[in-house]
Amino acid sequence: MKRRNLMKLPLAAAALSLTIGAGFAQDAEKVVIGVSIPSATHGFMGGLNWHAQDTIKRLGETYPNLEFVLATAPDVGKQVSDIEDMLATRNIDGLVVLPFESEPLTDPVKQVKAAGKFVTVVDRGLSEEGIEDLYVAGDNAAFGRVAGEYFRDNLKAGGKIVVLRGIPTTLDNERVEAFQAALEGSDKQILDMQYANWNRDDAFNVMQDYLAKYPEIDAVWAADDDMAVGVLEAIAQAGREDQMVVVGGAGMKDIIKRIMDKDPQLPVNVTYPPALISSAIEMTALNFVSNAPMTGRYIISSQLITPENAESFYFPDSPF
Amino acid sequence: MKRIDLHVWGPLIALIGLFILGALLNPAFLAPANLSNVLARSAFIGLIAIGMTFVITQGGLDLSVGSMAAFLAGITIMAMNALVPIVGESWGTILLGMGVALLGGIAAGYVNGALITKARIEAFIVTLGTMGIFRSLVTWLADGGTLSLDSGLRSIYRPVYFGGLGWLTWPIIVFAIAAVLGEWTMRHTRFGRHVEAIGSNDRVARYSAVDVERVRLATYVLLGVLVGVATILYVPRLGSASGSTGVLWELEAIAAVIIGGTALKGGRGRVWGTVVGVLILSMIDNILNLTDLVSPYLNGAIQGVIIVLAVVLQREKRTAE
């Protein structure tokens, strides 16, 4: 409903500029928005890339005066070059950036801001405050807390949990700390935590070793659905499907499907939507085509996906 | 005589040491299920490392194998999924899929080898290039996501990784056969001797009427075939391939070859040493997961120390020789 109204804005603006003339001519001028994101190296980023392209296509059709420059980077160095190129040669008016790492990207993004552009930072904050106009992110602490609270409230007394962590980063630390905090004081026990790098094969290996090491496991927090896939396969190999539940995260479509079908092994999931890039791009676009104020911080909460609400998180077309 | 023995047996002693350490730290280490897991996991890197031994021995290098495995897994899955409506969910489809993996491996290895021997570009540069190409291709084919095998086919194909003769699962058996054949080829065939001759001194080999370019090309094709075999065993495990499949496998394979006593500059190849190297690497991983000796932050450091130690040990023995 909201979008429909906004769609009329450029039309109204165009009509106005026709009648009133030069004063409003700027509204119809091309606005270039640069989007810089990491390339699709794993499932979550693949989903994020898909949503970014999808949003750009849709916005480009809705607002013909908006032009998007999308750059995907496999590493920090390339991302810095991308942003410098956008500023120097593509003459961008706004930038949406999901920084690979906070520190190295802070200065290049600061340069963009110094050139008077609208800057939106997504998911990973810069190391200096007050650079960006708009900050859009998922809630990593809530991501860990929601999973922890689920285990606290639903596992049997004395339940034993093993944890697979991602890649050693602040993001991973925030999640795990919140997870531990949620379980603190409860009678549930965390047996072990190892890194599996958000990778299916690594998760398979780590889970095989957990199964060899612990004769009794009641729950696995895989913290990511790519890792959950590897975990499930290792459990199936050991024939211990009935003994433990697996909670992943980020809502991969195959996993959501199994939650919808009430798979006892996968009771719930926690959202960390890759579509948060869509929120960021849309809000940045709105800044240029509407009068709605678009500055500030926008934190997308992490929700618990249950068999009851799973359907609204199911995107069969997304590659993730 | 005694000293030479020590030098040759260095990696094996390290492996036995690790084995004893693992058994002492956690009795679960010795459980047949755990040992079977470790061996089966080693099979992918192991098969690739056996091929890599030949490439490195002739003085070459191949950085593209991890990406190549991901790419082959991707096209194998796509081919099988496409064949389901025609051939049906049967072993026929799977055998055709295996054919795709092997032919793909031969083709990919031939491209690497031809660019190196016929176009005369440095092996490092060629395979660095193809590494990026294969990796991007699989990401592109998967649309940035994951390619998944048809679930019906999956359940037929699954025993190829998980089944076998008791604890000896198929990956372990295939790895063992490849190791024996590899060692035999290196030691007892003309091809093996040519590979070593070229690695020691390619000019002398050329003067001795060895067809240097052809032998070099053959080592890359052999490596491609083994990457194909590794893919055939890899796909049934998780039934999927993505841009994150096989990341850094090339470095693990090269590390295993060097730990096993093959010289990085070429000329001296030891396939059984490579097998020991692969086992050392996967056993370290396993032991670190089974014990709480060090913070998981330090896992990489422990691996690094053991890799360097294994090679240092050999070098010392070598000077003693």
Image (spheres, coloured by chain):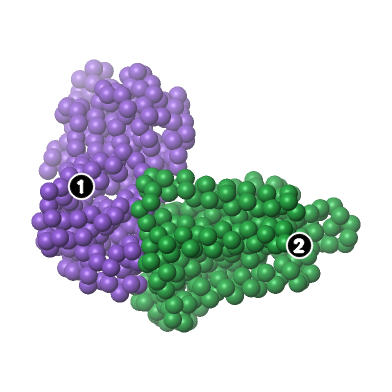
Chain colours: A purple, B green
Observer-nearest of A175 and B144: A175
Question: On screen, A204 above or below A110?
Answer: below
Residue A222: x %, y % from top left: 28, 56
Question: On screen, A26 above or below A247?
Answer: above
Circle 1 sits on which residue?
A180
Between disc 1 and disc 2, the foreground one is 2
Q: Give the image quarter of residue B62.
A: bottom right
* Quadrant of the image containing the C terminus of chain A: bottom left
Residue B175: x %, y % from top left: 55, 71
Residue A224 in sight here: no
| Residue B309 left/right relative to A217 | right
Residue A7: x %, y % from top left: 19, 38
Mark 2: give few (<14), some (14-19) or many (20+) Cα within 10 Å: few
> Which residue is at a point 75% across and 54% down the rendered structure image?
B321
Q: Tell me the subunit letter for badge 1.
A: A
> Which residue is at a point 67% across and 59% down the rendered structure image?
B6
Q: Are marks 1 and 2 on the same chain?
A: no
- The type of residue carrying mark 2 is Met
Q: Tell me the subunit letter for badge 2.
A: B
Observer-nearest of A232 and B314: B314
Label 1, label 2: how far apart the Cα atoms are: 58 Å
Observer-nearest of B302 and A239: B302
Circle 2 sits on which residue?
B1
Q: How many marks?
A: 2
- The type of residue carrying mark 1 is Gln
Residue B309: x %, y % from top left: 57, 49
Mark 1: give few (<14), some (14-19) or many (20+) Cα within 10 Å: some
Label 1's element? helix
Label 2's element? loop
| Residue B196 left/right relative to A211 | right
Q: Give the image quarter of residue A243.
A: bottom left
